[in-house]
Amino acid sequence: MKPKDRNIPLDLTHSYIPRPEGSLFEPPYVPRMDLAQINFNPQAIFEAPCHMNFAERMWLFATVYALGVERYLEIGTARGGSALIVDLAFAILERGGVTCRGVLIDKSFSNVSSETRQKLCDRFDFIEKPVSIAAMREANYLVADPFDFVLIDGNHRYNHAIYDTLTVLPFVRPGGFLLLHDAAFFEVRDAVRQLLRLTNLTDCGYIARHVNVHAKEEPRDPEGFWAEEPTRWGGMYLLRAPDVGPR
Ligand SMILES: C[S@@+](CC[C@H](N)C(=O)[O-])C[C@H]1O[C@@H](n2cnc3c(N)ncnc32)[C@H](O)[C@@H]1O
């Protein structure tokens, strides 16, 4: 459904009730599509203005397509590259009769070109706000469903990675996935460890292990916990929401 087709007033006063049905633990579905009909240019995966390496781009595209993600949430869009990669998978899924929708949350979309925005606006809504419960309620309202898959790629500081993950968690479908990018960065890595202690998320581990070591070190407290850590960017860590029960 395109945004212009939806003529629903935005009512943020409703309470969100996670749907117990529709778990991603249910048997897989089979999209019906004629692969010969698909007009797909794989080069677009590599040309997207994305802060991800080759392995990460491939994984994101293949996983969104393979899982049949219908409701996608992205925290941190930057120039729109990761969303464009998801859009490529969505375009193919839609040929199989799936209605795919995404919500992009970023504190600023000023780096998204008008061309990229134009490509994304059919399947994605943009929420230009920092991550918060209010932003999540708006996101949830826009797609009218819990999210199947969330990319968490906003602020990579330890507290932010924990805050962002815990804030989106009530809006994730049972069995849904949370993908943390730059999980090789020491603050995100340790945030993941802490999240695994704090929650009953399933630990799916590092699912992309290609990282970049940067000559420029991230500033840090020389006396602090991470004083000796080299700065590595990239790496993707996957967590999975439990099937039932309060979190
Ligand atoms: C690493 S970039 C995202 C890259 C993008 N996912 C890609 O692969 O193309 C991080 C983005 O997170 C956004 N961001 C940082 N802190 C945020 C916050 N608290 N809430 C929402 N967005 C935030 C920044 O504005 C920036 O655009």
Image (cartoon, grey):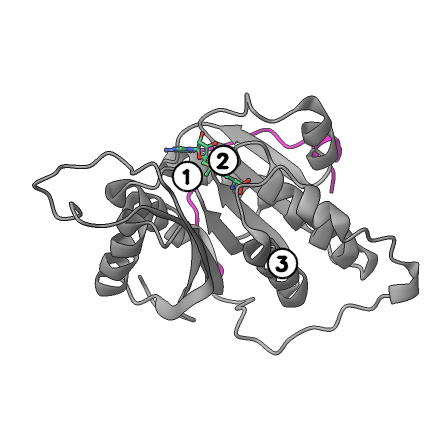
Residue linked to disc 2: 105
Few, some or many residues within 10 Å of mark 2 (<14, 14–19, 20+)? many
Q: Would the CB of label 1 be found within 8 Å of ligand 1?
A: yes
Give the mark nearer the N terminus: 2 vs 3: 3
The quadrant of the picture occupied by the N terminus is: top right
Q: Nearer the viewer, mark 2 or mark 3?
A: 3
Label 3 beta carbon less than 8 Å to ligand 1: no
Magenta: main secondary structure:
loop
- Determine which of the numbered discs, if any, sits on residue 58 in the image: 3
What range of the chain is rendered magenta?
A: 1-19
Left or right side of 158 for 173: right
Which residue is most to the bottom? 27
Q: Residue 154's mark?
A: 1
Residue 155 left/right relative to 108: left
Q: Of residues 143 and 74, which is closer to you in this image?
A: 74
Q: Find residue 145 and report its horizontal and vertical position in percent.
A: 55, 51
- The reply to whether callout 1 and callout 2 are in contact (CB within 8 Å) is yes
Mark 2 residue CB less than 8 A from any atom of ligand 1: yes
Compared with residue 37, is residue 217 higher up or lower down, i.e. above or below?
Answer: above
- Amino acid beneath label 2: Ile
Q: Amino acid at mark 1?
A: Gly
Examine the structure image and report whether residue 173 is included in the region drawn in magenta.
no
Of label 1 and label 2, which has the lower sequence position? 2
Task: Give amino acid for label 3.
Answer: Met
